[in-house]
Amino acid sequence: MLDLAAANLLSPMVLCFGLGLLAALLRSDLTIPEAVAKGMSIYLLFAIGFKGGVAVAENGIDAGLALAIGAGVLLSFGLPVIAFTLLQRISGLSVLDAAAVAAHYGSISIVTFVAATSVTEAAGLRPEGYMVAVAAAMEAPAILSALWLVARNGQGRAMEPDLLREILLNGSIVLLIGSFVIGWITGPQGLTEISAFITAPFKGVLCLFLLDMGLVAGRGLRANRQGGGKVLDRGAIAFALIMPLIGGGLGALAGAGVGLSTGGVMLMATLGASASYIAVPAAMRVALPEANPSVYLTLSLGVTFPFNLTIGLPAYLWLAQTLNGA
Amino acid sequence: MLDLAAANLLSPMVLCFGLGLLAALLRSDLTIPEAVAKGMSIYLLFAIGFKGGVAVAENGIDAGLALAIGAGVLLSFGLPVIAFTLLQRISGLSVLDAAAVAAHYGSISIVTFVAATSVTEAAGLRPEGYMVAVAAAMEAPAILSALWLVARNGQGRAMEPDLLREILLNGSIVLLIGSFVIGWITGPQGLTEISAFITAPFKGVLCLFLLDMGLVAGRGLRANRQGGGKVLDRGAIAFALIMPLIGGGLGALAGAGVGLSTGGVMLMATLGASASYIAVPAAMRVALPEANPSVYLTLSLGVTFPFNLTIGLPAYLWLAQTLNGA
Amino acid sequence: MLDLAAANLLSPMVLCFGLGLLAALLRSDLTIPEAVAKGMSIYLLFAIGFKGGVAVAENGIDAGLALAIGAGVLLSFGLPVIAFTLLQRISGLSVLDAAAVAAHYGSISIVTFVAATSVTEAAGLRPEGYMVAVAAAMEAPAILSALWLVARNGQGRAMEPDLLREILLNGSIVLLIGSFVIGWITGPQGLTEISAFITAPFKGVLCLFLLDMGLVAGRGLRANRQGGGKVLDRGAIAFALIMPLIGGGLGALAGAGVGLSTGGVMLMATLGASASYIAVPAAMRVALPEANPSVYLTLSLGVTFPFNLTIGLPAYLWLAQTLNGA
Amino acid sequence: MQMHPAKRVEITIEAVMERRLTEALAGAGVTGWTVLPVMGGSGRSGVWSREGQVGRAGGMVQVVCLIRPDRLDGLLDAAFAVVERHIGVVCITDCAVLRAERF
Amino acid sequence: MQMHPAKRVEITIEAVMERRLTEALAGAGVTGWTVLPVMGGSGRSGVWSREGQVGRAGGMVQVVCLIRPDRLDGLLDAAFAVVERHIGVVCITDCAVLRAERF
Amino acid sequence: MQMHPAKRVEITIEAVMERRLTEALAGAGVTGWTVLPVMGGSGRSGVWSREGQVGRAGGMVQVVCLIRPDRLDGLLDAAFAVVERHIGVVCITDCAVLRAERF
Ligand SMILES: Nc1ncnc2c1ncn2[C@@H]1O[C@H](COP(=O)(O)O)[C@@H](O)[C@H]1O
Ligand SMILES: Nc1ncnc2c1ncn2[C@@H]1O[C@H](COP(=O)(O)O)[C@@H](O)[C@H]1O
Ligand SMILES: Nc1ncnc2c1ncn2[C@@H]1O[C@H](COP(=O)(O)O)[C@@H](O)[C@H]1O
Ligand code: NA
Ligand code: NA
Ligand code: NA
């Protein structure tokens, strides 16, 4: 496992993230235009969804898909409860802040997922193509779970009907599922047509995208530090390092339980371990505007994302290999 | 022809457009940043112009070029008259609106042209490289034609001198002709240098671009529906389905008449059939500001573009093959 | 050398720049969105830095690196003095304007450097990978030199401490050095992973980027002409044609002096010859706001950049070959 | 040139709330507004910028409404109901407009 | 700090008309303005947004002019001649500026 | 709805000066501002536009501050110290704000 970790730390992907982080912490004016970053994330979602669909078209579909989605949805509903309880114990966060953070950790980070795919491929594994559907299915339930936690703690309010539609149809879910279905329909032949676009340059785009993630995470950390660092206590930071291991462990168990391949188990672990930093923050701004965005964004993007990218991914791969006896 | 149509409907290109349309109609917040969409369209224009120029460099130039351009210009001048007459008969549009719509149908849609190129290539055809020059030549005449129609109907006004320059030198014409000339000058050797950029990823970029077109068209349709749907009567919508067939038919005849290859005839049909949705709308906002943009954009982008992309292209291909006895 | 120059003039790169220039002078509305242009420049910097690092990983490092950086820094400090003296003699520019211009010519233009790399490769040369580090090292010293010239001429003021950090950590330096280090660490294996992204499409992206440079330069020239053309006297324009030859000559000598390969000498000449148009203008707006940006931007971007791209690069290549007896 | 007194209301609000705000405005009979992009800012909830998009999911926007003075209260009530729990600011200025029939 | 009374004129207009407007302003002797991008809006001609660029070819922009009060009429006449047949709004506010020599 | 008098200060300045300006504002105790992107403009130093980025390294931005009237002078002093040697304009308008506790 240490070899894996070392190789991962020295991959262009992780180094690019590190460069972004460093540049931001040094207050360099290096920035990637918002439109370009959004363009790259659209590219990555489209490519990964499409390739997942093609894999399903090639290998056919089995009960595994339904089981995996079911397990994923359960995880997404359940993890926030664990996260919330943990936060209540080890951090001084308010109920609202703790619930908002919990929503992030039940949901998933698609970039972490993309990076994990890249790691599985480097390890010669071929995860189930439908894992992208599982990823999409896990985005939203955690939000409902967190709102329920808030309500149960006496601070609930009616959920705006429109919000649910917004969450379920948010851009990244629609693009992921849509390109998955397109890949499924067009199959390997469709892939041949566009693979020079979605396969060959994929890793390079991911590197530049992670450079931007590093910049954004670094700026967030700096802003947090400037704010006196009081926003986050040690308990909360410990949470952001422990929770991915819990989520990753449960994800791996769930994946192995529903009979996924080693690559699939690794991806399931990653989904459990990763924390949203786009869809859930947006939903929280609408549903729980009083929760402090610095808290959940710093934890999710500033602590857990780098942790997963550097240490988590090799650990989940190792876990998957161990569980599946590979 | 039905096979062609079915294959076309299940191509990644058309499915991507459909995904965009669906996402917009479901009110998903999926969007492609304006700058990225514009970047993709610059890429597509540059690539198609360059490749056209290289094809001319390879095959040499003949009288066909001048004839094809002549035929295209005539079509672009003539089609608005047909369109205007038809609209006056079957729709309730005002003179100004009808003339504005007519300008769009005389002119061309470069994305439809790009998609058509991709269809001809899939069919193993090698259209004349100079068809991109024909496309560029057909953008502007229709606008003059429409302004003349307005004047003849007693609502004319002096045409601003600057407008003509703006139309003739609009970005897409300049880029298309410019890259065509560059491709011509540098020839196959120039293509070798940059083909990994302009050839390999071309189709994939086109897919993402069509996703955006679907989003934009879908939002337009939705806005139109919200507006009570009163903007467009049935006659106008029927027009948007009939007119491309007329334009496509005349285009195919003109193409066969000047002796183009089957691929060239197919592209000429597409140029006749397609309706502008960038250059002409901009010109109309300046020259005929009282004409309602919802009318011409909904017809051109919301009805005719999807029609051409899905049903039109295979039909024009079939027509070209029939006419050229291939 | 004439062959070289002719081949260069008809390369897609130079023709694209010419197209942009022409489009702008004709007042076409062709524009490349700012975000896309910035995205392309990030891509180019990342790719060139990374490939430089990989080359160093492959060939190992030697005393040449330190010597070349030393020579580059000296040039960057020294060239502004020459430039300033020359301007004082042959142009009517004020002390502040002359110093600001001098800063630009001591520093470097990374796009010219990228274009030069592309020329060396076409000539079958393999310049030292660490030349990108030399390029990064040469950005800043010229600014200090120019501020010192201002101070010596009695118009100095305290340099804001923050400005130095801003200059040294400006985005392009950080990205260039960062990706250089990443390429160095990951070596040829890292390159294999992402070469479909950073190697194959490189030249095509460069073409589109130069198209944008042409547009920007052309608009600048037009604005300058509209302003009555009085901003720049003949002496200043002569300077912008002579100075690159001086800088290029000294750069070539320095490169040959520290024992660089022919490709390396050519790049060193290019660094000496090229004038900044991003980092230095930004620094000048902060440090010498009274200096007229039209002056330094028109000279650097409107005169020297096109000169280097078309005539300069083949000349520096010829010079390098002559000096190195190749 | 004939000018007509009006009010200019400028609402700076999170982008995620834009649709909700404009729907509330439309609900209150306000049919004219213009949305401007915002690059960054600072307030009680800290400093943010569009490029370091941490702290404001998707950033903020500025919605500008020109309105007849007698319709101001309706607009403010509608806007306030949306803005209330959220960060952001509302600024009202006296102004004059041409072509009063548009407001 | 010394302030000088001035007028702030804000013209929201289609992007295709921007050059025509600023040329008209320059023709009327107005040499200072700032152009702001517009993301979307709503008016008599419906709702539009920059991302769903249907309904406004190329979107709209906002041109802001600060001007000495006595020059307002010239500016409005010039602007109105361009804006007249087109969609868009014009809003005039009293303001104060520093460094009056610039206006 | 309860409104409170305030001042709206709009500072158009080169993008390279933005951080220096906001730091000066913060130093003068001003904690609220909004930064708007600028696409182009014209002034004594000529015409420029973001796409033909020659003439203004990195373009300009507009910083808008809403502030209690009694704090205006402090703000202007701080801003002026930064803006003084640089191109750009400052425009001050009377306005009203909701939620006065924010200013
Ligand atoms: N006094 C102010 N002047 C201008 N903009 C403000 C002011 N206060 C807040 N804002 C804007 O509103 C956003 C949220 O402010 P707040 O609710 O105070 O955190 C800030 O990021 C600014 O964009
Ligand atoms: N009352 C208003 N307040 C602010 N902006 C407006 C108003 N009315 C119109 N606009 C802007 O002007 C554009 C065109 O308006 P109209 O000419 O009414 O269709 C709209 O899309 C808005 O951006
Ligand atoms: N009178 C004005 N009204 C609005 N904006 C102005 C005015 N004068 C200058 N500006 C803005 O400030 C920038 C620099 O102006 P200047 O310092 O006069 O060159 C211009 O490019 C405009 O964006
Ligand atoms: Na998770
Ligand atoms: Na047509
Ligand atoms: Na130099």
Image: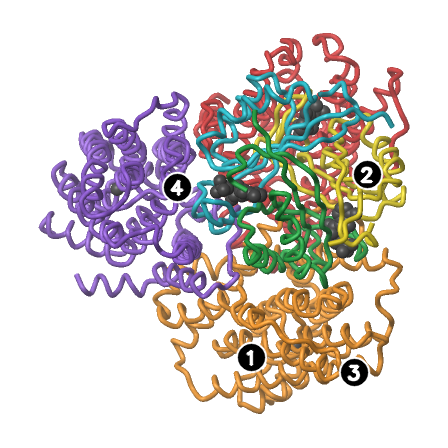
Chain colours: A orange, B purple, C red, D green, E cyan, F yellow
Q: Position of residue A71 (x, y in %)?
A: 57, 86
In the image, are marks 4 and 2 on the same chain? Answer: no
Q: Quadrant of the C terminus of chain C?
A: top right
User: Do the residues under discs 4 and 2 have CB atoms within 8 angstroms?
Assistant: no
Circle 3 residue: A86
Residue at mark 4: B278
- Helix, strand or loop at disc 1? helix
- Residue indicated by mark 1: A263
Tag 1 subunit: A
The residue identified by callout 2 is F20
Q: Amino acid at mark 3?
A: Leu
Tell whether label 1 touches label 2 (CB within 8 Å): no
| Count of numbered circles in the view | 4
Label 4: chain letter: B
The reply to the same-chain question for discs 1 and 4 is no
Q: Report the Cα–Cα distance between label 2 and label 1.
A: 50 Å
Q: Nearer the viewer, mark 3 or mark 4?
A: 4
* Amino acid at the residue labelled 4: Ile
Q: Position of residue B4 (x, y in %)?
A: 21, 61
- Quadrant housing residue B204: bottom left
